Every structure is written in structure tokens, then in C-alpha cells.
Image (cartoon, rainbow, N blue to C red):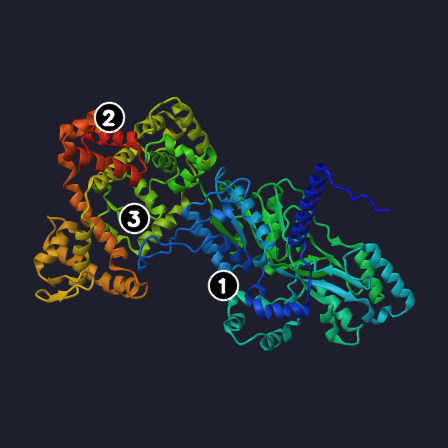
Amino acid sequence: MKTKKHTLSKQELEKNKRLNSILELSKNVFDREKRKAVSFDDFLKLTINEQRNAFRDIFQLIYDMVHYYVPKGKDDYPVSKNSIGFLKYDFSNLLEKDVDNPFFSDRLFANRFIKLIDTFKIGTQKNRIYLFEGPPGSGKSTFLKNFLHKLEEYSKMDQGILWKTNWQIDLSKIHNINELKNIKELETLVEEAELSDVPSKKITFSCPNHDHPILQIPKKYRYEFLDKLLPNNKFKKDLFTKTEYQWVFKEEHCSICNSLHHALLNNIDKPEDIYQMIYAKPILFNRQMGQGISIFNPVDPIFTQNIRNAKLQEQLDTAFSKRIVDFVFSYLARTNNGVYALMDIKENNIERLHRLHGIISDGVHKVDLIDEHVKSFFLGLVNPSDKQHYENIPSFKDRITNIKIPYILDYNTEVAIYKNKFGKGISKLFLPNVLENFAKIIVATRLNKDTKTIKSWIPNPVLYQKYTDKDLLLLKMDIYTGIIPDWLSDEDINKLTYDVRSGIINDSAVEGIEGVSGRQSISIFENLLSKCKNDKKLISQETITEFAKENEIISKNLATGFMESLGRLYDYNILQQVKESSFYYNKELINNKISDYLFAINFEIGDEKTSPYTQNKIKITEEFLDEIETAIVGKTAITNKKLEFRKEQQQRYITYTLSQEIKLKNKKITETKQFEELFDKYSRNLRDKLLGPLFKNSSFRRAIIDYGSKEFETYDNKLKQDVEHLIKNLIKKYKYHKESAKQIVLYLIDKKISV
């Protein structure tokens, strides 16, 4: 009799589909969370193939993790003797994406943090605790949580493997358990313990101190062993010479692994069989379980008792017939070659910090009578007011590294925080530049009025009163974002030497401790949006000026005269945008003039040459060179100043533009940084001559008002062309829309701002 084939119902099919999804998810989780151990022999093969990733400790892992998530930094200006390495880093993958609460790093902190991490690469990080110092509301806790979360995630990737020793003791090779009674007793113990999925004739456990497998080679033989093992390549040279790898040759294995080595040597026939029992296994960091990462809050109780494993101890005692291996370790072992973090230095964390001092100094911790070697990334968070708990202890001074994590001092980062909190669409509520100006108001409350380096660089701020305030806060803000403003004179730009610029950046270490906090800033910005939500007009500079003066928290923390200076800088910036948008470029003509100039300054007056950039035949005369130099340096500039400018441009052209950008990087002359700067200065000079007459023309103002209406068609073609060109460029280049572009032009005309 044939059996009737069962057809699955729709509900059963859906159920099977769900089960398959769960099984697939479980498999992926299992593969990711529980990696199997590999034999010591296979691990050695891995070291030959992967090399650098196989030989790393917690500090090298963190270095690799940070540079995995953070792309190489970019310098905004040509690298020169005055470059200070103040780079633009993208921290979004490390601290913003795929986290519960993103941390936005400004450029100052990003550079401090990368410099710290780069010390891990050169092996200068041991015997220290790293304290991230900042006021309440600066985001310290968010930073730490996100950083450690990404470390957990990285440890689950193939790129993020950090190896530890895994023991699989083969009982059949131990003399003391050859008696039938001991074998059966031990097999029973192993089966009851269910410590692993390996056959029951093995005792399996991982080193609780996370010893790297290479440390199981006795220290006195390690150099010779690796010399023979590794191919003669660049990594081998690095391994034997660079400080970052000295731990490979200097560190001992832990007391448990050490005693186990001695026990096995005395109870097996072939010493080499020990290495058949050693395996390598990836460390999986798990903050929740305190595995590899432990974070202690101030109220968490202090644990002092040592940790034992009674079942495993009984197995080891039975295997060797006596207590040879004392399986005991401290709570610090769980973060050895891992991360130990203190969340705020107060209450119980004060005692924890003091206890760590002795451990960090010697790298050793007593467990009963046993020395337990400790190497962890020790870090903590501290408020400035809590530094009293350690800063007056002399022996702490050379053991603690402070990394400043103050309130945001980069207005672009402050804007990014607003957009994250209230949505990217908030930009559409403001006229262009105004949202950034609100962020500048907040940042200004966090800056010191008197920082010596910038004041010594610009001793007379009144010369720049159109662009910055008397305390130079607006100038300092730009420098903190990596910008050197174009309104600075060439003379002052030349004075911005390596020492001056690095001094300004270093002075930022004492800023961002007071003023409007991060949490207050969010609340104040929310109040601004609430106040303006029913307004039909976009939020303007006048609106935020009025709001700032009425807000008690802002006005209390803001320097006198700052809002007026910000208004003047706003006028200057939008005027440049309108000038740029109104200008009809004959780009080819300007390109040719500057290209020929850069070629011609390398020859003598009276020479006749053919430019390789334009194929123009040039007779090099003072008049020819003077045209460009007058447009850039100015009509009133004396001859000596023009000659000095010519000499600087010639030197820069030879040493960088030609030798680096054109010959090495294969850039066109028009793609070089020097050309772009000269093009901008030359065309700006031409722009400045055009806008004044337009603004004085009453018909031009009426045409702006009528733009987009039927009345606009009644104006003459030239005027219509000028207005349309201006409005369309403002929209295209600076993200205005039609009404806001009209609004900003009328604002400049009515305030009579045209030069």
C-alpha cells in the first residue's frame, strides 16, 4: 500500500522558514562567538603566514583596531616645515556608527587620541594608567562605552584575533595515572566537569591569564626558536629589533602555565609532547561577562578574594598524584592582556586606583605566595575636581597619563551633535552659515579669553576687527577646525610657524572645562527651535543674536563684544559668497595667466621662453610679472614686498609644486595647491571691483525683489542676466534656495555692505 505524501500547509512552511532562519542565525553566532582552538603546530604555521597579526598583545591589538576603523588622517595644507600634523580624522566608524549613543569627536581630541594610540605601536605604553579627563557633560562615559564596544566587535573579526594559550593535557602520556584506578577516576572527573568538547582523555582549559602561545617557549630559547622558524623578511627584522615586539622575548608565562610545564616535564617521556598539548585560541572580549574587559563603577564592591576552579584543581591533582599545579588566580587575570577601566575616580574607584599604582609600577600582583604578572590596558575617566585623589601623590606623577576630553571646541562637531539629536533636516530651518554661527556662540563660552600663544602671534587684534573679536576667539575656533582664514595677511600667515601653530593647539588643553556643557547645549538649542517653530522665515543671524543675548546661560558665559564680532564676520562671509556668485569667470584666461607666471618666475628678466603649460611664448618682463603680483599683493604694495612675494612663490614652486605634486604625483599645474591659492587670490581681486556698482544700482535691488515673478521680465537683459547668474550660483555653490538667496542679497544691500 502506498503511503499518502504529506503536503506542508502554509503555516508549516512559514514555521520551517522561521526555524531555518533561527538555525542560520545560531550558526553565525556560534561561528563568530566560539572559535575553535588550533594546535601549536598549526599556530606556528599561522605565524609564518600572517606574522604581524599573530604576534601582538593588547596594546598592538588596540592600535590595529583604531586604525582599522579610522582612515588615515588628512592635512588641509601642503606639508612643509611648518606642518604640525594636526590632521583631519574620520572617527565615525569607531565612535558614531552602530552604537546606542554616538560620540562625536572634535579635531583636537581626535589628534590627541591618535597620538596616544600611536605610542602603543612603538611599545612605550607599559606601566601606566591612562585617565581621560573632562568636566561633567563632556561625553567621557559615552566615549568609553563606544570604544570598548568596538573592541568587542573587532575581537570577533578575523582581523581582530588576539591569541591565548589553551591546554589540552593528554592523560595517556602522564606516568602517574598509568594505574587503572587513577585512569578511571580521572576520566570520571573529566566527564563530570564537561569542560570542553574534546575526548574525555584530555583535561582542557584556557590559561586564565591569557598568556600568548609563544610564551610557552622557554624565554632563553625563544630568540633562537623564532630565528629558525620565521622567513628572513622585513617582519622578522621588525620582530627582533622594534620595541613593540620586545614583550615576545622578555615576558614569562604565568605561574599556572609555568608549574604545569614543570609537572609535565617530570611526568612524561618526551618533552616535545608538551607542545602537542598546547593549543592557541582567540580571546573573545565580553564586557558583560568581565572577560577581557572589566569596567568598574564607583559603587561596585571591591573584590579581594582569589579565584579557583575546584573541579579542574581536582583533575590536575589526580593527574599528577599531588598538588603540583596550584590553579589559582586573581580577578585581574580576567583582564590580563585586556582592558581594565574605572568609570570615574570616586568612592570605591579611589581605592582601586591606589591599588593599581603598585601593580603598574612592578607589573606584579601577589596571589597568595605566587607572583602574578599583570599587563593590561588600564584606563579611567576623571572629572577635574576628582584629580585631588591622586595628583598630590608624587609616585603617581610618572605613572599616570592624562588625555583631555573637554567640551567640544570645534563648531563643525557641535553642529554634527545637533543634527544627530534633532535630525539632519534642521539645516533647512536656518539661513546658510547661521547654524554654524550658533555653534560658534556655544563654543565661545568654553574658550579662554587669554591664551598666550595666539595673543603673541596677533598682538594687535584691532587690525582684524572686521573678522574676529578682541580676544581672537573666532580666529582660534577656525584654527581648531584646521582652517587658516584667508582674511589673515600674508605677513601673519608667514608668522604662523611650527612653534606658533603647535603652541596654539597645545593651549587648547586648558580650555573646554567651563562654559556651556554638552547637555546644556542640547537643551539651549531645543529652546531656540521651540521659539522659532512658528516663524515662517528661516532662522537668521539677527534671530540667534537676539536669542543669545536673552539666554541667561549664554550671556553669563560669553565674552563682551563677541556677538558683535560674530555679526561682522557673518557679514564678511556672506559678502564673499555673493561676490563669488556674482563673478563671471573667464577661467581659461586666469588659468593661463597664473600658469605662465609660475613658469616665468624661474627665469631672468629679458628671457624669452615657451610655457610647457599653455604653449604660450613669453617674454619675461617686470610688467608681465607685476600684473599678477599687483592683483594678489595689492596696488599699494611697495616693490620690495612684491619681490619678496615672487621669491617665496619661486621657492615653493621648485621645492614642492614641481618636484612633489607635478613630477611625483602627476598632477596638472592647475591641480596643485599653489595654483589654487593664487587663482583664488587673483580672482578675488577681480571680484572686489564688480559688486560695489551693482549694489549702488537701485534697479538691481528691485530686480532682486522681483526675481521669479512676472515683473522680473520687464528689466533689461543685462540686469536680468546679472541677477539670475547671482541667484543661481548662490543656490548651486552655497546651498541657498531662491527665497533665502534673495533675502541675503537684500540684507547686504540694505546694510550697505559691499566692500
- Amino acid type indicated by mark 3: Ile
Q: Distance from label 2 to label 3 (Cα)?
A: 41 Å
Image quadrant of residue 550? top left
Mark 2 or mark 3, which has the lower sequence index? 3
Seen from the viewer's position, the closer of residues 369 and 147 is 147
Would you name the residue on which mark 2 appears?
A: 709
Judge by depth and name the residue closer to the eye, 705 or 457.
705
Residue 127 makes an appearance in the image: no
- Residue in the image at 87% along x and 65% along y: 183
Q: Is residue 745 left or right of residue 227?
A: left
Instruction: Specify the label residue 122 is tagged with.
Output: 1
In terms of secondary structure, where does tag 1 sit? loop
539 sits to left or right of 711:
right
Q: Position of residue 571 (x, y in %)?
A: 25, 35
The residue indicated by pointer 3 is 484
Disc with the residue nearer the chain's start (1 vs 2) = 1
Q: Nearer the viewer, mark 1 or mark 3?
A: 3
Relative to residue 354, is residue 704 depicted above or below? above
